[in-house]
Image (cartoon, rainbow, N blue to C red):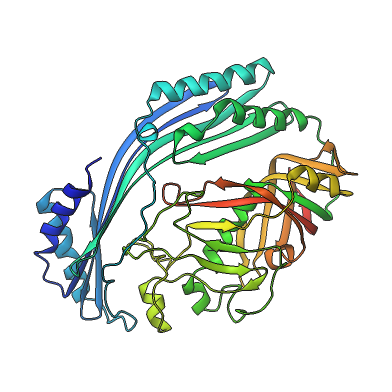
Amino acid sequence: MIGKERILEILQGVLASSEADQTEAVFIGSQRSLTRFANNSVHQNVAERDTDVIFKVALGKRIGVASTNSLNKGELTDALREAVRIARHQVENPHFSSLPSPGEYKKVETFFEGTADFTPEERAEGVRRIFKRVEDKGLKVAGAFSTGSGEIAVLNNLGLAAYQPVSAATLRMVVSSDDSSGYADYLCRDIKELSVDDLAEVAIRKCLDSRGPRNLKPGRYDVILEPPAIGELLEWMSMIGFGARSYQEETSFLSGRLGEKIMSEKMTIYDDGNDPLGIAMPFDFEGVPKQRVYFLNKGVAQDVVYDSETANREGKVSTGHALPPSSRSGPMPLNVFVEQGNEDEEEMMASMERGILVTRFHYVNGLLNTREALFTGMTRDGTFFVEDGKVKYPIGNLRFTESMLRAFSNVEMVSKGRKAINAWWEEVGAAVVPTILIKDFNFSGKTE
């Protein structure tokens, strides 16, 4: 860890030399260690440190962006000059007005020394215990156990200076037999929350219960989707529909529908970077404090998230959801929550007369029809047929093709418990989701 004072001192010195009208620097530093394993054996231990400094400059309304992975003053200055050179050759951006001014963001605990200092030997000991449990059952396991930390700083020549240290730990595993598999994962900032043994037991149980899968005819079934499956769907919905750019381009499923009821009243979905139940991060990559934003409130479409540029297009203010300056994706929610319900998983299972229990999805494609949130994908690592409130037998994996607007309009039950699910943005966000029971979900085919 370099530390707040040193990072700000270095970058403020470079910003002072800028020839641009306005200048921003974003510092993203990380150190991550990873233990990969397969066939009940560790096959890779890696550790990396990386630093990325991204400069964004404005010459009037002409914008330039350049980056370096060095903290050497000369190379930082060269990257800043390159950003200025690029800006001189750009056309004006009519939606740029100014970089953000300083604001106050909430103090959220996002860094835990135990996670940052977790050693390869400690990861190996956790993995060894997984191997022992799996081998006792005559099974095999593959997965990855990662721990790390980082620092994020955003500053500009308007006086904004934001800094946040972060840590994160992730464990994923797939336990397999000759004809079955079971999945489990966990994501947290504090390694003390992670129980390796409990997680291994979940994956082992899924694998054993999945032995001898039967074929099930594709069609519409009631379905219980566990958190990993819901998290995968929410990740795609965030990308295609919850950001202002897709909303303004009218490709989002929320475009033209704000104020309308488009899902079940049991569905409330929002983004909150200040909630410690998730992988919190109190400001965005422009240094703007994050606001809680509701996308759906009891099924009614409410709003989308903004960065400075997309907010200017509509005469609004940023909600604190800018991605790094090098990104071309526009604003995106990174801390998505689905509000919990009133039932537990046992009640949901008991209520199902005939349906399917899904552990998780993979190979999901959410670009089929973004206006209708039409997705396709496949089940994996634990798919079961349920009858009269009990799991009857495992089934072969199925492909689904379904509109999420339709699916989430057919929600019958939402669990009390929620879980943080890893996403693309591991150290600065996650999807915190419950288990959900949906009526009449469309499985369009089988997988081999």
Q: Quadrant of the N terminus?
A: top left
What residue sits 80% from the left and 46% below the top? 347
Residue toward you, 34 or 226: 226
Residue 429: x and y in percent read 46, 52
At x 51%, y 27%, the residue is 37
Q: From the viewer's perspective, is residue 124 above or below residue 281?
A: above
Q: Locate residue 72, reporting x and y percent.
A: 13, 48
In-image side of 12 versus 307 (left or right): left
Give the image location of residue 221, x and y in percent: 83, 54
Identify the image quadrant of residue 394.
Answer: top right
Q: Choose between 372 and 99: the one closer to the eye.
A: 99
Number of numbered discs visible in the structure rendering: 0
In the image, is 119 to the left or to the right of 366?
left
Question: Which of the 4 quarters of the picture holds residue 91?
Answer: bottom left
Q: Name the residue nearer the viewer: 35 or 386.
A: 386
Residue 133's place in the image compared with 342, above or below, is: above
Q: At which x and y percent is residue 53? A: 24, 54
| Residue plotted at (14% across, 52% down) | 10
Q: Is residue 97 visible?
A: yes
Look at the picture and state if 388 lies above or below 191: below
For the C terminus, the image quarter is top right
Name the residue: 60% across, 63% down.
269
Is residue 258 found left or right of 287 in the rendered image?
right
Where on the picture, by quarter, is residue 321? bottom left
The residue closer to the viewer here, 372 or 419, is 419
Q: Is residue 397 visible?
A: no
